[in-house]
Image (tube, rainbow, N blue to C red):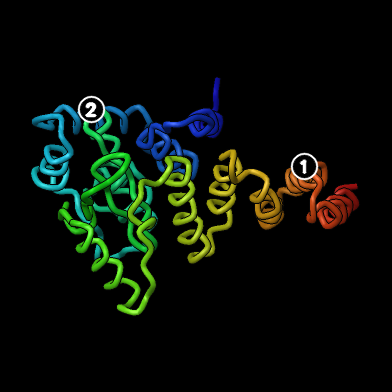
Amino acid sequence: MVSELDRFAALVAHQPVPLGEASLLVASVVGHPAEVDHGLRVLDDLAEGVEGTTLEAVVEHVFGRVGLQGDRTDYYHPDNSLLPAVLERGRGNPVSLAIVAVDVARRVGAPASVVGMPGHVLIGDGPTPERWVDGFDGGRWLDRDGARLRFAQLHGPSAAFDAAYLEATPDIAVMARVLTNLLVVFRRVGDARRSLRVLRLRAAIPVLGDQERPLLAAAYEAVGRYPEAATVWRQVQAAGGPAADAAEAHAERLRSRLN
């Protein structure tokens, strides 16, 4: 039987990534009890309720009739980054809400993209966005000036703005951002075990794997899983590069501890 971690690794190996399914697998790997297939059925039902094949129709249904919205009360709660909880509660953070909208849009054939503006994820109206939607603000539509204003509200009027902030974000980078959010949340509450699970997911993303391995090895050590930590350090050593010597020392230290 293929594990959910392996399923996630298979999904993120190619573009486009089915963002909804990948996010449901993330939640399952870190310990949310909802079944992935149930979450997929919920996304199917959301798509079936859309009256049309445009992003406008998706936004009206997801944020209007269904009423998904940003969680302004407890922004850093883990549930805001776990898609099954977002679908159940109707609240989430900007990236999770964008993932729902874009996943539903793709199901009905509407052009849409996740736009990873620093500090606040938006929804673009296609692969080269000309308009944007703020899902955290209940599905508010923004033109370019409105998006720049949202950036200034977050970072201050003197913060430098780059037009690239409003470009579509690759699916792989979207999933990396989801996992970064979860890692921050779990480390904030001192949850070493779920932090380890997040790092295992991050290490499964091709563009992140090599750079994540030292963090993953340290996370294994933090929960007392020394054989796994030694194995990862050996992988770092075998990959060569600046970290190889330090990895060899770490692996040797753990080998002596296990003997």
**In the displayed structure image, the side of residue 111 where residue 77 appears, left or right:** right
At x 43%, y 50%, the residue is 178
Q: Nearer the viewer, residue 105 or 111?
A: 111
Q: Quadrant of residue 22?
A: top left
Left or right, 205 with reference to 129: right
The N terminus lies in quadrant: top right
First along the sequence among labels 1 and 2: 2
**What label sits on residue 109 in the rendered view?**
2
Three-letter code, disc 2: Gly
Q: Within 10 Å of the Cα at label 1, are there few (<14), some (14-19), or many (20+) other Cα atoms?
A: some
Residue 25 position, x and y percent, is: 44, 36
Position of 121 with respect to 12 (left or right) is left
- On the image, the x and y values in percent for residue 206 come to 59, 38
Q: Amino acid at mark 1?
A: Gln
* Observer-nearest of 200 and 164: 164
Q: Quadrant of residue 105?
A: top left
Q: Nearer the viewer, mark 1 or mark 2?
A: 2
Q: Give the residue at mark 1.
A: 235
> Which residue: 15% across, 43% down?
59
Distance from Cα at disc 1 to Cα at disc 2: 42 Å
- Write down the quadrant of residue 235 in the picture: top right
Label 1 element class:
helix
Q: Residues within 10 Å of mark 2 (few under 14, many from 20)?
A: some
- Element at badge 2? loop
Where residue 192 appears, as percent x and y from the top left, is: 58, 57
